[in-house]
């Protein structure tokens, strides 16, 4: 399988997901498929990762594990993101958090970090800062979609400002780590997945609004 054919496959998957989640008669079925979609996208990203060195696998493990454990602390204490809980769409839960969310953190950090590498700057701080701003903006569009699709819910119905502050801070730290690591960061899929994620959630956000 080539990168080009995989990008076409992924575009079809995201489009099918958008349509399926937008139609009431198919919504539940496509919600059930969400963890499999995240797993498939992660698999393809890793498959096309050049030179899967030990530093890459360490980054993968740390970003996924930190993402998951932060969510566990967030759900258990309410002190990080605010008061929220995971529902059914993201699959089975351990300590009240679906482990697939760890893969999603890796996916988002990896793709956002790779996208920001195109900036004409050598400053790790600036690249991490811009990436964290992108991640936070993405969460603004993703939150209403995630709530509507039964991924998670907030005690007061809407995410507090605290959620976005935490998203920015955690994203910045993980992106800084991404930029400091020495593994090969050129991936033929990462930029495409970055845009697919944005188009998918922004489209669902707008569909729900209008």
Image (spheres, rainbow, N blue to C red):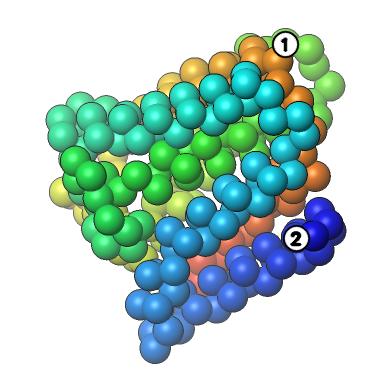
Q: In the rendered view, would you say 194 is above or below 76?
A: below
Label 2 – label 1 distance at C-alpha: 32 Å
Give the number of the disc on residue 196.
none
Depth order, front residue of 65/120: 65
Q: In the rendered view, would you say 177 is above or below 141?
A: above
Q: Where is residue 82 in the image (x, y as percent from the top left)?
A: 23, 36
SS state under label 2: helix
Q: Which residue is drawn at 48% across and 29% down?
A: 61
Q: Residues within 10 Å of mark 1 (few under 14, many from 20)?
A: few
| Residue 8 placement, left or right of 45 | right
Residue hosting label 2 = 6
Residue hosting label 1 = 123
Is residue 81 visible to us here?
no
Q: Where is residue 18 in the image (x, y as percent from the top left)?
A: 55, 71
Q: Where is residue 16 in the image (x, y as percent from the top left)?
A: 59, 75
Q: Residue at x 40, y 78 (%)?
A: 29
| Residue 161 placement, left or right of 136 | left
- Looking at the rendering, which quadrant does residue 73 occupy? top left
- Looking at the rendering, which quadrant does residue 65 occupy? top left
Q: Position of residue 199 (x, y in %)?
A: 63, 59
Q: Residues within 10 Å of mark 2 (few under 14, many from 20)?
A: some
Q: Which of marks 2 and 1 is nearer the N terminus?
A: 2
| Residue 193 placement, left or right of 206 | right
Q: In which quarter of the image is the N terminus?
A: bottom right
Q: Residue at x 36, y 66 (%)?
A: 149
């Amino acid at each position: 399988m080539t990168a080009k054919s995989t990008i076409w496959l992924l575009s079809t998957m995201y489009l099918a997901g958008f349509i399926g989640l937008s139609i009431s008669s198919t919504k539940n079925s496509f919600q059930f498929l969400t963890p499999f979609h995240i797993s498939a996208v992660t698999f393809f990203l890793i498959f096309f990762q050049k030179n899967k060195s030990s530093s890459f696998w360490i980054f993968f493990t740390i970003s996924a594990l930190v993402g998951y454990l932060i969510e566990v602390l967030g759900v258990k204490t309410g002190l990080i993101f605010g008061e929220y809980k995971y529902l059914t769409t993201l699959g089975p839960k351990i300590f009240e958090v679906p482990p697939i969310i760890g893969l999603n953190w890796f996916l988002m950090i990896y793709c956002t970090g790779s996208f920001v590498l195109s900036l004409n700057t050598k400053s790790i701080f600036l690249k991490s800062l811009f990436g964290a701003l992108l991640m936070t903006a993405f969460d603004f569009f993703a939150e209403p979609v995630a709530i509507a699709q039964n991924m998670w819910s907030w005690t007061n119905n809407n995410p507090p400002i605290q959620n976005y502050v935490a998203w920015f801070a955690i994203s910045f730290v993980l992106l800084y780590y991404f930029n400091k690591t020495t593994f090969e960061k050129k991936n033929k899929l990462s930029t495409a997945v970055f845009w697919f994620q944005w188009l998918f959630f922004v489209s669902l956000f707008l569909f729900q609004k209008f």
